Amino acid sequence: MSSNIFACTVFMGSKNGVTLVGSNEDYKKSNSQVFFVPRNGEKYGYALFGYNGSIQSGVNEKGLFWDGLRAYPYSKSENIQNKYNIGGNVLHKILEECSTVMDVILLFEKYYWEGFRLSQLMIVDRNGESAIITNGENGLAITKKEGCYQVCSNFRISSNESTLKPYWFKVGGGRFNKTEKKLQKLEINETEFISILKSNRQKNIFSKTIYSTLINLNSCEILLTIDGDFSRMLRINLNEELNKGRHSYFLAELVNTTNENRTKVAKYDADFLTLNLDTIHFDKDWAQVKKISKAAYYRIIERDSILKNFIGRDYFLNNILQGEVYYSSINPEIADGKYSEFYDNGKKKVSGQFKYRLKHGEWKYWSKEGELERVIEYTNGIKNDRLTNCKSNAG
């Protein structure tokens, strides 16, 4: 199979006070969305892009952008520097609290994130700074921009040398080299960046470019399209959308609607269930499937009319409860309240609490036989590895 399957290409350029970042999201046919989360107190407002309810990239009102890319080869998941383990969703935290690339670097220098075992993050700010952050042999690996541009694909970047000589299987190496050569010759403007996105789009029996974005981090203007069709591009403004409150759109509805009718495009608020209220089926790896024959679990989401939140319950196919989680929003998905997991014999596996998508308080973990194995204390998503007895056998 092609090494470009289910891949992505992200690149940035900055010159004369203008910073642009382009991204192709490549996957199988999916329902792409954009979510808008307005400022909440000291937390910045931001937009998230993704598909089928998942989140792949984001940009905030301060002109800070991130995109997460699968990175090969996978690295060991070891907290060798003994940092505090951030158990919450760090990708939201970046957009809520950071405004520069250095802010993000300092965050990861303080906290360990297990997600780097499988991925790397490209971070860009409106000042033209850029860095690719991932795990290396000695812990956190940061590759900063050299010159006026930077490119990221799907081979793991752990040093400047590895950007020049990708790993032997060259996952994304072709797209990386093509984009880099173009950036060396082209001007940094919308037209030239769209040409790079076009040249890297995919459309084959295995994978396709499901959506593309081009963002001006200075003006917060966003150009987007779907299915690799650059004859239909839509322009939206991040700040204007944030002023409308929390909402989302399906990208297909935006892009495929004429300018005259765009104001009529459905805008989904925080109560909108991305996956609707129907039963949702998942395989053993928790990927959504349509054929029940491939399913290992199913999910039902209900609205709590008293607490005004959502309750998601997952079941094994034999109808035994597998898990339960409370959400304050499904759009985007924000766990906020009690959380439980169960074994297929009905015994409890995990019990804890989320506080606005971050693990908070005491989390307990049991064996399949019902013995309490670990008790871990979290404070706003931060796991205190240094102070917690993770092998507690207390009853």
Image: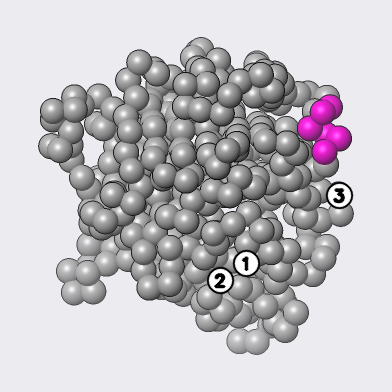
Q: Which of the marked residues, 3 or 2, is nearer the chain's N terminus? A: 3
**Disc ID at residue 381:** 2
Q: Amino acid at mark 1?
A: Ile
245 or 203: nearer the viewer: 245
Q: Position of residue 8 (x, y in %)?
A: 57, 30
Q: Which residues are magenta?
A: 160-165
User: Pointer 1: residues within 10 angstroms few (<14), some, or many (20+)?
Assistant: many
320 or 5: nearer the viewer: 5
Q: Residue at x 53, y 81 (%)?
A: 361
How many numbered marks, from 0 up?
3
Q: CA distance from mark 3 to mark 1?
A: 20 Å
Disc 1 on helix, strand or loop?
strand
Q: Quadrant of residue 251?
A: top left
Q: Residue at x 18, y 33 (%)?
A: 262
Q: Which residue is mark 3?
A: 137
Disc 2 on helix, strand or loop?
loop
Where does the C terminus fall, quadrant-wise? bottom right
Residue 83 lies in the magenta stretch: no
Q: Is residue 275 visible?
A: no
Q: Which of the marked residues, 1 or 2, is nearer the chain's N terminus? A: 1
Q: Quadrant of residue 176?
A: top right
Q: Amino acid at mark 2?
A: Gly
Q: Residue at x 26, y 56 (%)?
A: 243
230 or 383: nearer the viewer: 230
Q: Residue at x 37, y 27 (%)?
A: 225
Q: Is residue 366 above or below residue 280?
A: below
